[in-house]
Image (cartoon, rainbow, N blue to C red):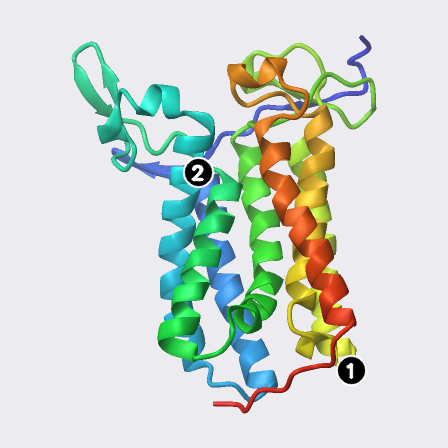
Amino acid sequence: MNTLLAIHWNASPELFSLGPISVRWYGLMFAMGFLFGFSILTRMFKYEGSDPVLVEKLFVYVIIATIVGARLGHVFFYGWEYYSKHLIEIFLPIAKVETGYKFVGFQGLASHGGAFGIILAVWLFSKRVSKRPILWTLDRLVVPIALVGAMIRTGNLMNSEIYGVATNLPWGFIFDRNSETLAKHPTMIYEALCYLISFGLLMYFYYKTNDLKDRTGFLTGVFFIGIFLTRFLIEFIKENQESFESGMILNMGQILSIPFILAGIWLVNHALNNPPVLYKNK
């Protein structure tokens, strides 16, 4: 396989370190995503006259739910065989070694688990705080989440992880840090670009159309289709994350994406066939 046109990638996952503390690109992208998301959602609430204080309360729910949900998603969807025997490692950033335990950071987050966690958090927020339907909140929250997803995939690129199978395409990446010798599909870049397109579409539908943002579930449906259909299709050229996926027709990421895709199609259809719903601002 010709690798002359391939891109050699050997970026360090660490931005800088101070003694035992290191700042990694992945964590920075995660944190910046939340900051940008908070700013975007605050502007959206102000634009439509809703109380921006709600955003502060919502983000407390969302940040906790994202981290806990993504971690549990990895544990139960991808690594239960291991974590069932090492329960202490589920929420402690350590790993068992011959001499005991050592600090290694969390080794795995799953986006589908994060999505389930966010939905649960928004349901609780809607019941306890906003007193509005869960879809009203989700229709606004999913807009910045699409951008956050693109930033997290950028963090995956800096970590040289979750890339694709071998390719002859000129934009294939040889991930030198992982001792790869063949060019691979940079699937994290593909996903990041698709997530950015989804973010742009959602921003357009929210600000530039007359009533789509008020058609309950429309923006959430577009988000589910744009994000999870992208994930489903790109998984066909992505290397399996876990060995148990090698004999599966569809891998775990694709199986978990199907309910979101179907829900997205139903939500868009339902929204377009029902009138807009206006809520009194507060």
**Location of residue 271 (image quadrant):** bottom right
- The residue under the point 25% across, 35% down is 92
- The residue under the point 56% across, 68% down is 135
- Nearest the eye: 57 or 200: 57
Is residue 108 among the parts visible in the rendering? no
Tell me which numbered mark, 2 or 1, is placed earlier along the sequence.
Answer: 2
* Residue contact at pointers 2 and 1, CB within 8 angstroms: no
Q: Position of residue 260 (x, y in %)?
A: 63, 48
Left or right: 168 in relation to 137: right
Up the image or down, 209 lies above or below 188; here it is: below
- Nearest the eye: 84 or 274: 274
Q: Position of residue 11 (x, y in %)?
A: 55, 29
Q: Position of residue 127 (x, y in %)?
A: 40, 72
Left or right: 271 in relation to 67: right
- The residue under the point 65% across, 67% down is 217
Q: Residues within 10 Å of mark 2 (few under 14, many from 20)?
A: many
Up the image or down, 217 lies above or below 266; here it is: below
Mark number, residue 210: 1
**Location of residue 64 (image quadrant):** bottom left
